[in-house]
Amino acid sequence: MYQRIKKWLQAISPTVHSESVWTNEFTTEEDDVIDIRFRLKGYGWKPNAGDENLSSLEQGSYKIYYKLDGGSTWIFAGRVSSKRANTSDTRVYENVGFTTGSIPEGKYNVKIVADKGAKFTGWGGAIEEIVSGGQFWSGLEVRSLAYKQADVVDSPVITEDVGVALV
């Protein structure tokens, strides 16, 4: 049994990452990752590039996969849809967060697919916030195993020290 560190830690920026067409991939630098989270750019379709603060027309979504570094099978982690930004924002779609949840300890490859990017490009109009071949994610954070702690072999012994006065 293991114990997760309760705090999210700012992850080391991946040295292995790629952005191609509507897919981003990266590899965590840490070897003992058991949770991964990051932010995704909110995106969607709108009729004109200059349109601001519209009601959502067609929101984008991402499919996220992960695998152990060196593994061969991608595991589907989930699908995340963009959300409507606040009415005071000039953009239409807000950024969203994604967390893998508890995963076995290891170093991971993560694949993010903007699954509506190609569809929206064919519609004309404009895709807000992302472009083909761009980076869709930011703010990578991880949780890892707690530091190893020595097992208690002997029961603790408490001795009362009556000769010392506490002031």
Image: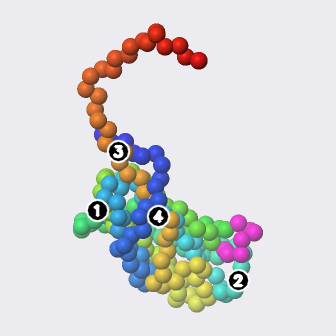
Name the secondary structure under disc 1. Answer: strand
Mark 1 / mark 3, whichever is N-terminal: 1
Distance CA(mark 3)–CA(mark 2):
51 Å
Query: Is residue 7 magenta-colored?
Result: no
Residue that badge 3 annotates: 147
Label 1 Cα neighbours within 10 Å, binned few <14 / some 14-19 / many ≥20: many
Distance CA(mark 1)–CA(mark 3):
21 Å
Mark 1 / mark 2, whichever is N-terminal: 2
Q: Position of residue 79 (x, y in %)?
A: 46, 65
Say above or below: 51 vs 150. Answer: below
Mark 3 / mark 4, whichever is N-terminal: 4
Residue that badge 4 annotates: 140
Between residue 44 and residue 131, name the one nearer to us: 131
Circle 1: residue type: Leu
Q: Residue at x 71, y 71 (%)?
A: 89
Label 2 Cα neighbours within 10 Å, binned few <14 / some 14-19 / many ≥20: few
Label 4 Cα neighbours within 10 Å, binned few <14 / some 14-19 / many ≥20: some
Name the secondary structure under disc 4. Answer: strand
The residue lying furthest to the top in this view is: 162
Q: Main secondary structure of the magenta part?
A: loop
Residue that badge 1 annotates: 68
Circle 4: residue type: Leu
Q: Position of residue 18 (x, y in %)?
A: 38, 78
Between residue 81 and residue 105, name the one nearer to us: 105
Q: Residue at x 65, y 86 (%)?
A: 49
Distance CA(mark 3)–CA(mark 4):
21 Å
